Amino acid sequence: MPDVNARANYAIFMAFMIKKMINEIIAPVPYLAPYITNYFIIEFHDDSEARSFLKVPPLGFPVIQFHYGERASFYNRPEFKDESLIIGQQTHHVSLAPVAGTKFIGINFTPTGLFELTGIFMNQLTNGGIDGYSFFNQKMLNSFLKELRNSITYEDKVQLTENFLKEQLFPVKFAVPEYIKTIISEIQSENGLVRIADFAVKHQRTIRTLERNFLKYAGVCPKIFAQILRHRLIIAEIYEKKNPDWQNCVYKGFYHDQSHFIKDFKAFTAVSPLRYLPSINLFAEKILR
C-alpha cells in the first residue's frame, strides 16, 4: 500500500496540475461520429512551471493532435515536431513533456476510424506516429494552424478542425470489414476481459486472420487490444480510488493471482503498481474519462 509521503506528494502534484491545466471535451458532428469519438482541448497556463514529465497510459485508439501554443517537444521525441502529429496505438505508457504555453486540440478516433479516413495501415503507426506535414497538404495545413492560433473560442477551434478534416479526408474511401468492427465493439464492451478464440469461432475466422486484420485496421492484434483495455480498466480504478485495494484490482482484471497482475502491470508501465502511484497526474485522469 502507498505510504503517507506518496499520498501527500500525489495530493500536492494534483493540486498543482489543476491550477495550470484547462481541459475541454467536445463531441463531433454526426457525420464524423462513426470515425471520431471526441475532441479534447488542453492548455497549460502556469507561467512559473518548468518542464515536467507526465506518464500517460495506452488508450486503445489512435489520435491526431494540432498544436497552436508554444512549440516544444511535447512527446519528447525528435521525430515529432509538435505542430501536427498523427499518433498510432501505444502498447505501453508514454512520457509527455508539457511546458507553460503548451496548447493543442486532439482528436480521439475510434480504433479503426483513422484508417477509414486516411487509408494508413495502422500497424505502421504502432508505438509511434508521423508528422502531419508528411500526410496533409502543407499549404492547407499551414493555413489551418494559423486560423487555429487566431481563433478565440473552443467551439471555433473544433469547427475549424472539422472543416479541415472534411477538406482533407472526405469522401471516405477506405472500408473495414464489419466483423472486425463488431469484434472491437464487443471487446470494448467487456473492457478486454474476453477470450479471442471465442471470436474466431463465432465469426468463423482463424486466429491468424483476426490478427492480420486487426494489425492492419486497428494497429495491434486482438489479444494486445484486449490487454490494453484491461490495463486501462485497472489504471482507471487506480485513478478513481487513489489508494486502491490491489487484491480488488487482481479480481477486477480477472488475473490468476497477484504475481500475474504485477507482471502484466510492469509490461505496460515498466514499474510495479506501488511505484506507479507517484506518476498519477491530472492530464491522464482527464483523458481516461
Image: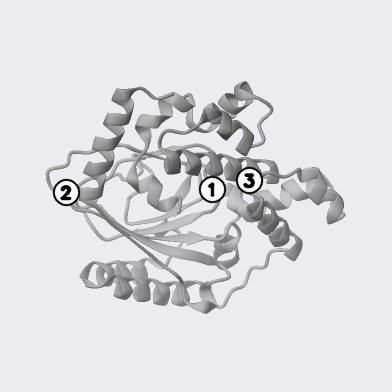
Residue 12 appears left or right of 27? left
Q: Secondary structure at mark 2?
A: loop
Q: CA distance from mark 3 to mark 2?
A: 36 Å
* 256 and 186: which is toward the camera: 256
Residue type (three-letter) at the residue carrying disc 3: Phe
Quadrant placement of the N terminus: top left
Q: Are marks 3 and 1 in contact (CB under 8 Å)?
A: yes
**Which residue is pictured at 67% across the width and 58% down the height?**
185
Q: Position of residue 83 (x, y in %)?
A: 32, 56
Residue farthest to the left, as pictured: 48
Q: CA distance from mark 2 to mark 1?
A: 30 Å
The residue that label 1 is drawn on is 89
Is residue 119 visible from the viewing direction of this image? Answer: no
**Precedes in sequence: disc 3 or disc 1:** 1
Q: Position of residue 247 (x, y in %)?
A: 57, 28
**Residue 225: assigned label:** 3
